[in-house]
Image: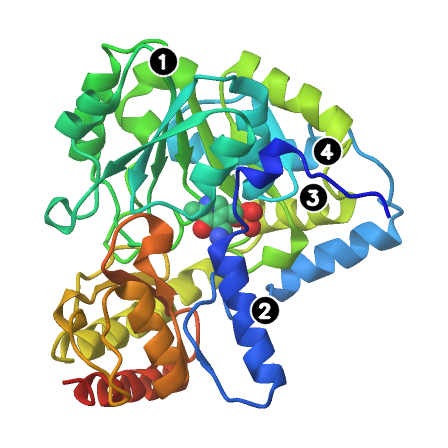
Amino acid sequence: MTEFVPASRVTRIKSSPSVAAAGRVRELKAEGRRILDLTVGEPDFDTPANIKEAAIAAVRNGETRYTAVAGTPALQAAIIHSMESRTGVRYTPDRITIGGGAKQVIFTAFMASLGEGDEVVIPAPYWVSYPDMVLANEGTPVIVECGEDAGFKLTPESLAAALTDRSKWLILNTPSNPTGAVYTAEELRGLARVLADFPQVHVLTDEIYDEIYFGTERPACLLRVAPELDGRVLMVNGVSKSYAMTGWRLGYAVGPKPVIAAINKLQSQISSCPSSVSQAAAAEALIGDQTFVLESRDVYRSRRDIAVAGLNAIDGLACRTPDGAFYAYVNCAGVVGKTTPDGAVISNDEDFTMYLLDSASVAVIQGSAYGVGPYFRISYATSVEVINEALAAIEKSVMALS
Ligand code: PMP
């Protein structure tokens, strides 16, 4: 048989650790084990009825064909409306790209812009996919560790130290996966001041969690606080998280015309266009009734409060209160070095997450996957019952350590 040799871009990268964790949980469940699953990176709600109805109507109306590469006029109009209220910028259709999820949009943006030697500054903890997406597209990830003392956020000093004349992109993800950190307007202004000295650098702001926040105001938006960056910010968003539409695979970005044109040119050869039915659904999500967004935010907030209080009550664990998204990033330095009842030493966050899975049947993701340990990420996009049961099980397992 002929040996298959994958491309170097495949061997350079790893599969997504969060997708792998979800797969492991599925396997264990299939073996009959009851797993308290805190790995899930998607809302546990169903897509709101008005959105489903819009999709059904689109199917009935025969909206079942290819659309323009850059999306339907209806979804473009909805994005223009939604982005204008967010940024203050009135985008034109040639500044919009719509793809099969924010993930695909980000990947295509890197494919459209990176060449060998191009650097992408990625603050850590980071969403697991960024470094591998950069590597897959010949770029060089430049990881900047942002410690807990800095609220897991990039500071102007660390940004200035990371930028070089080879820097092509800075990635900012606010609210953050995995930490839930949200940049304030003042913090973004500080970063914008540094960027003023590096005019060749574009900024990819991943704001997919911008509707899931727990302060009184929507998270600050880089373009709103630094409108002078308009010519170099690619602002990525999507409907997966805010509208519980992960399976619909629809994300979008607004940005400078040349960047968008390059992305859309590639998309014309990759997928032709995103799903017509999902586009109809997304248009309804953005301009239709927003009750779901408000109600789900309150639900996430109360779950966050329960999860954070419970984790901080466990001796050896500590957790900052996240300001957005549906994750908490838990410091487990207090359990590293301890010994399990079986005599194994917990030497890092990976050992600890394995121990939790074995002893407590609680699935979480090790911080090393996000570039900063010893931590683990929990998702509270699950029921209060599961959260409470998991907290009790984690506490019992931690107490069994010596
Ligand atoms: N960015 C971040 C930070 C995410 O957490 C995710 C989903 N896990 C995405 C982008 C991708 O979202 P989607 O492709 O579903 O739109």
Foreground disc of the pair 1, 2: 1
Q: CA distance from mark 4 to mark 2?
A: 25 Å
Q: CA distance from mark 1 to mark 2?
A: 44 Å
What residue appears at the point 34 percent right and 62 percent down from the top-left corner? Answer: 366
Q: Quadrant of residue 392?
A: bottom left
Of the residues shown, which amino acid type is indicated by label 1? Answer: Arg
Dot 3 corresponds to which residue? 279
Label pair 4/3, CB-CB below 8 angstroms: yes
SS state under label 3: helix
Task: Answer few, some or many: residues within 10 Å of disc 1's Cα (few below 14, many 20 plus, some between 14 and 19).
Answer: few
Label pair 1/2, CB-CB below 8 angstroms: no
Of the image marks 4 and 1, the number of the one nearer the N terminus:
4
What residue appears at the point 23 percent right and 85 percent down from the top-left corner? Answer: 395
Of the image marks 3 and 2, the number of the one nearer the N terminus:
2
170 up-or-down from 124: above or below: above
Dot 4 corresponds to which residue? 72
Q: Nearer the viewer, residue 69 or 37?
A: 37
Of the residues shown, which amino acid type is indicated by label 2? Answer: Asp
SS state under label 1: loop
Q: Which numbered tag is attached to residue 46?
A: 2
Task: Give the image location of residue 130, x and y in percent.
Answer: 44, 39
Task: Answer few, some or many: residues within 10 Å of disc 2's Cα (few below 14, many 20 plus, some between 14 and 19).
Answer: few
Of the image marks 4 and 3, the number of the one nearer the N terminus:
4
SS state under label 4: loop
